[in-house]
Image (spheres, grey):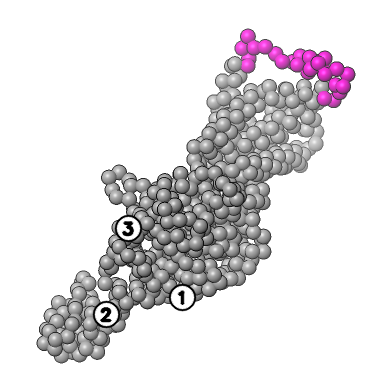
Amino acid sequence: MLQAIGLTSMPRRDRPPAVDDLTFEAPPGAVTALLGSSGSGKTTALRLMLELEPGRGITYFRGRPLHRIAHPPREVGVLLGDVPGHPSRTLRGQLRMLCAATGAPASRAEALTRTVGLTGLERRRLGTLPIGADRRLGLACALLGAPHTLLLDEPGARLSVSESAWLYELLRAHAADGGTVLYTTEDPKDAARNADRVVTLDGGRLVADQGAAEFSRTRLRPRVAVRTPQAARLAEAVTQEARAARRPVEVVAEGGSRLSVYGSDCAAVGDTAFRHGVPVHRLAAETGDVGPAPRTVEGRSGDIGSASRTPQSHGSGASGAAASDAARAPVGAACGGAPTGGARRPARSPLRPLRYEIRRLLGVPSTSLVVAAVLLASVALALLLGRGGRVAVPAVLAGWPAISPLPPAALGAGLLGAFSFGEEYRYPALTSGRGAVPRRPGLLLAKLAVAAAVALVLGVVVVAADLEALRFVYGAELINVPKNWPTLCASWLGLIVGCAWAGVLGAGVFRAAAAGVAAVLAVPVAFVPLLQKVLTGPSVRSAAGFPARLREFVGPQWSPSVDRWLTGGLRVVGQPAGVALALMLTGLLCAYVLTGFRRKARW
């Protein structure tokens, strides 16, 4: 049972709210249509139910509000518009990535692919799918968690007749299994044909809540659709003959050459056109909408305002007064409090963040393209720098000319890190229209861990590729291993990982991949020159004796190997680039935490 109680959106400027005091129910085992013209508040009502829109009221899903449900994707499946996935990701990769987000096994993706009829399209890119396949994929994404309730916004829009028939057959099957289905539509005939109940909206308010049979009887009636180049002449002839025969016939001009004739049939209209010599290009029997119905609700007394403000209790455990109080409470107060009693705290999304992040990274071609570009650029720069013989070996192996602020490997790691959050905001597949990307510690740690692993692998592969290229072109005598190679390796890998983390946090804070890249470039361009002036000033003290003083404090337990590692670590961290990266990462992490507190995380 889905119960929407007193849903009211926040008015914008001086305009009335898009949804005003909306109360209705969608019973289990039935398909409910939320009917209304464009701008009537259908989509806003769905967003209010999902707690994505600021306003008042509350929605119960089988007696529980959304924030009290432990695993929302396993209770509510949502399809708001097209599938918001990366256009270069494959259909199979999209479903498997979302399986990790919802905690479902990967086999669930294969089963749903067969269920929704997408077998054979698993390797198709999302950007190349036709509208019918895209809508099937959206339903598969909504069904991943095996939810009880489906909320769908205009699922039949732009579909062919066969695709629409398949869609509503699937929704009917879900309802027959005991599930609840609520979808929005603008077509009254669609609602009468495919729904068990029809909830009609007009101007954001409830107009009627009826069974499909009652809706068809009161809102729809048969008509004859006519198209003729002499519409005015035919309308006058039909009206005159009906008046003479004293038959209740109504002729409505639909504009141009179209007429709608109510109270007659195709044979009578065709005979009239023949007798008056009027050419007819189209003559068909249809079912038409008679316009907004009176503001009454089936099974309730009084006007709609009193009915929606004093809802009845339907098995949710709340009294009518309590439901009325909940309807008047703002969403933040009625839905945002901490769970009490036996309520379970909602699970963090995604449920398997590390697996989700790995599949997100490997599922798009941009990852392999960036890695390939980094390797090619590094090898080319290493060969150019090694040809002259005047550049230090570490710079040659890193492919880092003096004119470049960062080596290609650091730029590539920062770019991949920026994509990790940038793609979440540009193609929000994780949330599927359910608000901002969740700012969960598990998701952030997974992105940082994967970014660090990719950066380490990229740093090692770049050095190995540059070394082999130099040996192949110039011979082995060019490479002389420095004595301080452990410190150089630590500095190199630390730079790569730091740039990757700066890209992740920068894109997470400012919600764009370009911001993550800008955070990476700000380190060598802005912070390092400033720190070089500060650290090389005459009044700067040295911490070179810190390991010896620490050895005296610890005593005989101090190991010489620890002394060497600590000294090397201080040399790495004490470099201007290391200090600048540490300051940048600290600032970005603090900004990420603060912005996470300010924005309410959605499931």
> What is the CA distance from the residue labelled 3 to the residue labelled 1?
38 Å
Question: What residue sits right under mark 1 in the picture?
Answer: 165
Cα separation between marks 3 and 2: 35 Å
Rendered residue at 26%/86% (across/down): 266
Number of marks: 3
Q: Determine which residue is flagged by label 2.
A: 223
Q: CA–CA distance between discs 1 and 2?
A: 23 Å
| Percent position of residue 431, x then y | 53, 52
Q: Which residue is mark 3?
A: 306
Residue 473 position, x and y percent, is 74, 40
* Quadrant position of residue 581: top right
Q: Earlier in the sequence, mark 3 or mark 1?
A: 1
> Between 29 and 495, which is closer to the camera in this rendering?
29
Classify 561 as above or below 369: above
Percent from the top left, x then y, of residue 468? 76, 41
Q: Residues within 10 Å of mark 1 (few under 14, many from 20)?
A: few
**Amino acid under label 2?**
Arg
Where disc 2 sits, the SS reads: strand
